[in-house]
Each structure stands twice: as C-alpha cells, then as structure tokens.
C-alpha cells in the first residue's frame, strides 16, 4: 500500500493508505480529525474544505496520496493552543453565522483563504462569489457574509477585534 | 470507488510508458475523474498522477503566442499577469470556471483532454485557433475536438501544453447552470490574424464553430452584427435544465455579450 507523509496542523504524520483513500478519509478516520465534514461527497457542497499549502481544497475530491509532502490545515488547526479562536471563528460566533453548523468548518476554511487572497478588502459581492463552492442547507448566508466582512477587518489589521453584531 | 494502483512519474516519457496499459488513466487535478470514479463509472487498473512532472508546468510568451503547460491550474491562468495582458478573455474564462476550490485544483490539460461539452476551456482553444502540443505531436484545435468527451488524443498520448496565438481582441460569455455551474451555452469570439473565430460550448454535444456568426463579425465587428444571427436548434443538447431551442436562443445572447466584452 502507498505510504503518505504529510503535515497536518503543524504535526507530521505518516500513514499507509490505499490508492483510492480520499484525503478526507485519512483526516477523519486515521487521524481522527472529524471537524472536516463530508456533506455531498460529490464536490459540490464544500463541507470538506481544508487548506493544502495555504489554498482551499475540497478534501473529498483529493486523494490522500496526492497530498504527500503537503502542509494541510483543518478547522482544528485554527484556534490557538490556549483556546483563543481564530478571528474568522470568532466572527462566525459573534454574527451567528451558523445554524446547524454542518457547513461551518468548510465555510470558515474557504473564508480564510478568500480573505488572505484579498488583502485590499472584499465587497459583499466578492464574498458571495468566493463562497460559490460552499453550500449552507440552512440558507444562513446573510450572517456568514457579514461575519467574513468583519473577520477580514481584523485579519488585515484594520480593527483590533471583531465588531459586535448589531442587535 | 474501486481501488487502483497509483503511480507518480517524474517525466512525460515515464508517464507515456505507464499509460501504455489500456486500463490505466491519467489524473491531474482529479476534479472530473474522482467524482466519476466514486460513481464507479470507471474501473482503472492504475492512476498515473501527472502532477509531479515539472516540464508540464508554467506559462510563457513565445513569439506572438502564450504557451500554457498542461498542469497549469485554473487559478494560475486567472491570476497570470502575462495572460491578463495578452489574452484577458482567457484569464476571465479561467477565473469563472466552477468554484474557487475547482480552480485551485483543476488543470487546463485535464479540462481540454476530457472535452466535457459543458467545460469552458475548449471554447477558448477552438475560438483562438490554438495548437495542442502532445507527447508525440502538435494538433490544430480544428482537428482536436471530435465529439462528446472525445478528442484526437491516442490512449497513451498526453497533452503537454497549449499554444494560444495572441488575438487582436477576444471575449467570452456564458450562461451557467446556477447549481452545477457547468455551461449551458457559452460563446468565445476572437478577432485573430487568421480571421474571425466564434466557438460555442455547452450548447451542443461538443464545442463547435459558428460559421454564420464568424461571417457576420468579419463583415462588421459589432454586437448588432451577431444579434440577428440565429443558431439552429438541431443537434443541440436538451435536458431538464433547458431545451435545445432555449440553448439555441442563448447562443445568440451569449455571442452578443461576448462581442461586447471583447470591445
């Protein structure tokens, strides 16, 4: 069986996998990182989004062997060891950007990539287009968009903390 | 999906040898092949991962053409300063394929080799009169796309790069299915040294050239020139998302938008 060595959230792992093992299966079933979800399993919904070398990727449509040697970040790798949330997680909490929460890990990972690629700021339209690969079946998009706009301000140093959501 | 052996060759020559096995399949981004394998539509004995082959990567200007390596991902075409300066319509197209995650993994060579009728790139390849470079020869775009999911590539032949002549102007517009984001009808127009070319994707079983629109634009490059040209609905695709007649209508609408985008 092929062997794959990859760094996940700063920790190096080596695992034996089948050729057909998906990256999301390796993360969830071998490494027990179950924050990354499988929603549709057809590359549509984005619940499985992780970062490979800093870019958002659907881990249900990536073979584990294709991530050999890569730096992978999952939702578990965002908060600081003391539990301080990443600004994007904090913004999702403050803006109530989740209802059932199933899509949230993928939304957060896609949103961070989107914000990092747009240091000059993002319009609402850009945020909505940037989320084309993520589906929320609760249709809670409005608050997700607001949360991402708020997190972008903090991530780019234009604000020191997440603004309180308007009541 | 069924299990398979996995190979990651470092050179095109090694990849061609591995693909001599008729049951082996090439993979790059995998965003079309892996979903197909999950549905067990295919049972390859081996996947030959091309992503480690350095000679298939990169974008460069050669004379009056932009040559794009087969492994170049959509995000790289969309953000390439060279492509944006020389063929902005191609960068625009790349920036509107699928979603962000598809663009982060999907490659030009994979999309063009697969020749999905609803894929974007085939319209640019045919519309710009590009030349396809393979592991053994060069093929003109007009001779490359043979039918639905069918190209002139031999089973063990690998698309290595695509050479796009820089046009005087070009534009692309598409109507996409709002759920799948695949093209329902798209039109790529280009004014090139070799004349006007108009390629239609999404509407038929395979990308095709629209001769009546080419003649109309050659006589008068304007939105009005294509507005009156109707696409016949014969042989166009019909499915739950739209009838052949609807797609035929969209072709004229998209042609107008593409000419407007080209300026």
Image (spheres, rainbow, N blue to C red):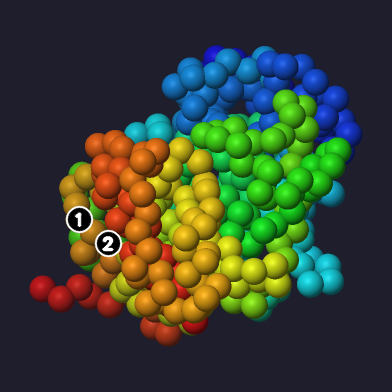
Characterize the local packing of mark 1: few (<14), some (14-19) or many (20 or more) Cα atoms within 10 angstroms.
some
Q: Residue at x 42, y 84 (%)?
A: A158
- Describe the element under mark 1 as helix, strand or loop: loop
Q: Nearer the viewer, residue B118 or B70?
A: B118
Q: Nearer the viewer, residue B104 or B258?
A: B258
Q: Nearer the viewer, residue B212 or B107?
A: B212
Characterize the local packing of mark 2: few (<14), some (14-19) or many (20 or more) Cα atoms within 10 angstroms.
many
Question: Is B160 positioned to the left or the right of B35 in the image?
Answer: right
x, y percent for residue B221: 50, 78
- Residue B48 visible in the current orientation: no
Q: Residue at x 40, y 69 (%)?
A: B226
- Residue B144 visible in the current orientation: yes
Quadrant of the rendered image containing residue A1: top right
Question: Is B34 positioned to the left or the right of A89 in the image?
Answer: right
Circles 1 and 2 in contact, beta carbons < 8 Å: yes
Asked if residue A142 is positioned above or below residue B50 in the image, the reply reads: below
Tag count: 2
Q: Quadrant of the C terminus of chain A?
A: bottom left
x, y percent for residue B93: 52, 62
Asked if residue A108 is positioned above or below residue A128 in the image, the reply reads: above
Residue picked out by circle 2: A144
x, y percent for residue B227: 35, 70
Question: Is B84 positioned to the left or the right of B188 in the image?
Answer: right
- What is the chain identity of the residue bearing mark 1? A
Q: How far apart are the alpha carbons under marks 1 and 2?
A: 7 Å
Question: Are discs 1 and 2 located on one and the same chain?
Answer: yes
Q: Residue at x 47, y 50 (%)?
A: B201
């Amino acid at each position: 069986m092929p062997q794959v060595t990859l760094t996940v959230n700063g920790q190096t792992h080596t695992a034996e996998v089948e050729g057909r093992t998906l990256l999301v299966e390796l993360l969830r079933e071998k490494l027990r990182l179950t924050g990354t979800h499988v929603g549709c399993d057809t590359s549509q919904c984005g619940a499985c989004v992780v970062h490979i070398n800093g870019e958002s990727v659907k881990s249900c449509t990536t073979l584990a062997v294709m991530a050999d040697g890569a730096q992978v970040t999952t939702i578990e790798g965002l908060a600081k060891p003391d539990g301080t949330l990443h600004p994007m997680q904090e913004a999702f909490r403050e803006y109530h950007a989740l209802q059932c929460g199933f899509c949230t890990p993928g939304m957060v990972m896609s949103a961070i990539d989107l914000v990092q690629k747009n240091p000059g700021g993002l319009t609402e339209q850009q945020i909505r287009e940037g989320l084309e690969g993520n589906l929320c079946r609760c249709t809670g998009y409005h608050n997700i968009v607001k949360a991402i706009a708020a997190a972008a301000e903090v991530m780019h140093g234009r604000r020191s903390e997440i603004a309180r959501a308007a009541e | 999906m069924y299990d398979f052996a996995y190979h990651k060759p470092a050179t095109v020559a090694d990849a061609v040898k591995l693909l001599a096995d008729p049951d082996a399949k090439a993979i790059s981004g995998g965003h079309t092949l892996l979903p197909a394998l999950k549905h067990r539509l295919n049972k390859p004995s081996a996947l030959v991962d091309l992503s480690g082959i350095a000679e298939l990567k990169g974008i460069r200007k050669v004379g009056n053409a932009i040559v794009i390596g087969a492994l170049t991902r959509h995000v790289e075409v969309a953000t390439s300063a060279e492509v944006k300066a020389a063929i902005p319509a191609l960068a625009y197209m790349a920036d509107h394929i699928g979603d962000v995650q598809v663009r982060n993994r999907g490659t030009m060579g994979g999309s063009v080799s697969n020749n999905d009728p609803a894929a974007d790139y085939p319209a640019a390849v045919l519309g710009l009169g590009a030349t396809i470079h393979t592991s053994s020869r060069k093929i003109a775009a007009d001779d490359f796309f043979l039918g639905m999911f069918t190209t002139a590539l031999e089973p063990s032949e690998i698309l290595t790069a695509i050479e796009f002549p820089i046009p005087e102007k070009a534009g692309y517009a598409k109507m996409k299915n709002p759920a799948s984001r695949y093209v329902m009808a798209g039109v790529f127009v280009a004014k090139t040294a070799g004349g006007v070319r108009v390629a239609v994707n999404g509407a038929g079983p395979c990308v095709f050239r629209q001769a009546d629109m080419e003649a109309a634009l050659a006589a008068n490059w304007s939105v009005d020139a294509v507005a009156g040209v109707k696409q016949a609905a014969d042989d166009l695709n019909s499915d739950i998302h739209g009838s052949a007649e609807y797609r035929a209508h969209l072709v004229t609408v998209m042609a107008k938008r593409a000419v407007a985008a080209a300026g």
